[in-house]
Amino acid sequence: MPIRILQPQVANQIAAGEVIERPASVVKELIENSLDAGATEVRVEIREGGRRLVRVQDNGCGIAAAETELAFQRHATSKLQTLDDLQRLTTLGFRGEALASIAAVAQVTLVTRSRDEEVGTRLRFYTQCTFLSEARELAREPIGVPAGTTFVVEHLFANVPARLKFLKQAATETGHIQQIITRYALAFPERRFSLVCDGRLAFQSSGSGQLRDVVAKAYGLDMARQMLPIGDGVPADDSSVGNGDEDDAGAASATEPAPGGPIAVSGYAGTPSLHRSNRSYITLFVNRRWFQDTTLAYSVIQAYHTLLPAGRYPVALIFIELDPAALDVNVHPTKAEVRFQDSRAVFSAVQRAVRQALNRHAPIPHFTQAGAGDAGPAITTWQDMLAWSSRREALLGAGRSQPGRPPEPPPPGGDALAGPAMAPPAPPAGVPILRVVGQMGAIYIVAEGPDGMYLVDQHAAHERILYEQMLGQHAGQKLAIQPLLEPLVLDLSPEQAAAVAEDLDLLNAWGIAIEPFGSSSYLVRSIPAVLSRDDPHKALVEICDGLAQSVDVAESAHEARLVTAICKRAAIKGGQVLSLTEMQEMVRQLEASRSPRTCPHGRPTIIYMSTAELARQFGRT
């Protein structure tokens, strides 16, 4: 085909596709404009998950009447003028692409009044494929309004069917929008944000300037109480931030020297008892800009080394403040990533700041270096025993690293499980009848078979047993359900609430009788009987976490993940001391399972050492 220049409308929609991915992208770009305009109050209203309507209203400086049409031209911006300005950005927006991109894929109405003018302006675009150099159908009229700006975006992607069909259900899109607003409320606690979904107030921050208030509003009071301040617990102030931070007063933010200038780290870190099944609860900001960075998220995880069970991740809210010249924010179409001039210094500063916060409130156990004849690290308390057991379990699973996650570094002083012995041979085909001998480390059941020694992971084994039991009960419509004496109220995050809204029927089918209870709250009236031994509230929150992480998988896989999450929470945990009778019963049930060798997640339930291998280890052969 011959080379041609694309038509302006096509080029504009292609460019818009890089910036506007879904309704949440529209909300993000408009909120950034409001914050850059100095707004102290931002109100967002959506209908049908933002597909039908997105309205963003602020009390910022407004747009001058003479500049309203110019604002929609591509690369028109008031944020920077020269290349030097790009090297030291202090605003959230800067490219001048957002309004042009939104107007290319939706119907837009702008109502604004500059603080220097007495009369406002209303500008409407009737065409959906708007390219302003050719657009003719514009309606412009004066209007009396307060100073500030209101954008009304309707029928998003109505003229781009290929994009429209990939949008998720309204509940999912609403969850993404609420997540965006929550992030900005956390980054700017001194400004008031509100979200109205289909006529219902779903979120509102107080604008008090207290970060802990926003944390409690966004994540719930229970989680906020388990958050430890890093430094003074609040982001560094700028000229627009109030100074009413007496409640969060404390040590100054952790500051590290670096070639690009000092690096200040503040925020909140969850206690070791507050952990989740994925790393999505590690939220990062740099100069109040939310961003994603796998490496920095790993620095937070490393700060919790030996404090969390294997496969669990911390909850953290990290604010980084440094010279704008020491980072580059112009590396991603949606500005979701940044590059640091000295990434190692930032990694170290974040890890050290979180570690110091944990040391102040939850001292980390210390291990002595194991020599050639030592039995291992010094264990003086039951907490040391649990930490050591978790460490061994993490080493056993080190070969199953997750994509994109850096490998765990070797523990100080080595470990008895390091080296070739870390991968023991698989047990013979089938599981023979075993004689239970005892329990090791309150994690593993030691058993004797006809041809050697077997170690059974009590948590993984119990998961497998419960998983097959639940599937059998559900297939026979005999699922054991435990009604609650008092309904349980769950205050969920935006992602969790969106996932639950989509899976209400699935949850009810598996014994979790759950119903909406206002904004992001849900009321639970019954649970599967297997969860009655655990803390129901904590178990249900983690199950909702799992649903939020699998919203895009097939329905059958989604159901399997739900059952797996239930069994994981209900299963006996590592560190739980079992009686001989309990261990014998668990081994008997495992022997009767259809797939006894792995848990539902694919982790091994049994490792095996033959009699011949034991004889070689003791020098008998």
Image (cartoon, grey):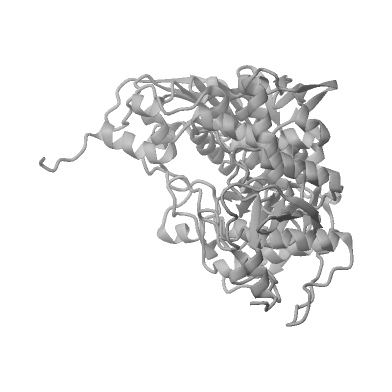
x then y, percent, for residue 267: 72, 53
| 348 horizontally vs 556: left or right | right
* Residue 113, x across and y down, in percent: 54, 29
Furthest residue toward right: 381
Q: Residue at x 46, y 52 (%)?
A: 80
In the picture, the quarter occupied by the N terminus is top left
Q: Residue 368 appears in which quarter of the rendering?
A: bottom right
In this view, the residue in front, 380 or 152, is: 380
Q: Relative to 329, does residue 599 appear above or below in the rendering?
A: above
Using the rendered view, name the quadrant where residue 400 is placed. bottom right
The C terminus appears in which quarter of the rendering? Answer: bottom right
Q: Is residue 452 left or right of residue 247?
A: left
Q: Is residue 203 visible from the viewing direction of this image?
A: yes
How many numbered circles are shown? 0
Give the side of residue 263 with respect to residue 390, left or right. Answer: left
Q: Is residue 576 above or below residue 88?
A: above
Residue 232, image x, y percentages:
79, 57
Q: Position of residue 613 (x, y in %)?
A: 63, 68
Quadrant of the image occupied by residue 31:
top right
Please determine whether, in this image, residue 135 is positioned above or below residue 568. Answer: above
Residue in view at x 81 percent, y 50 percent:
245
Q: Which residue: 83% across, 72% down?
A: 378
Residue 262 visible to the viewer: no
The single residue placed furthest to the bottom in the displayed view is 372
- Above or below — where is 308 with respect to 111? below
Instruction: Tell me what residue is drawn at x 60 percent, y 59 percent.
Output: 296
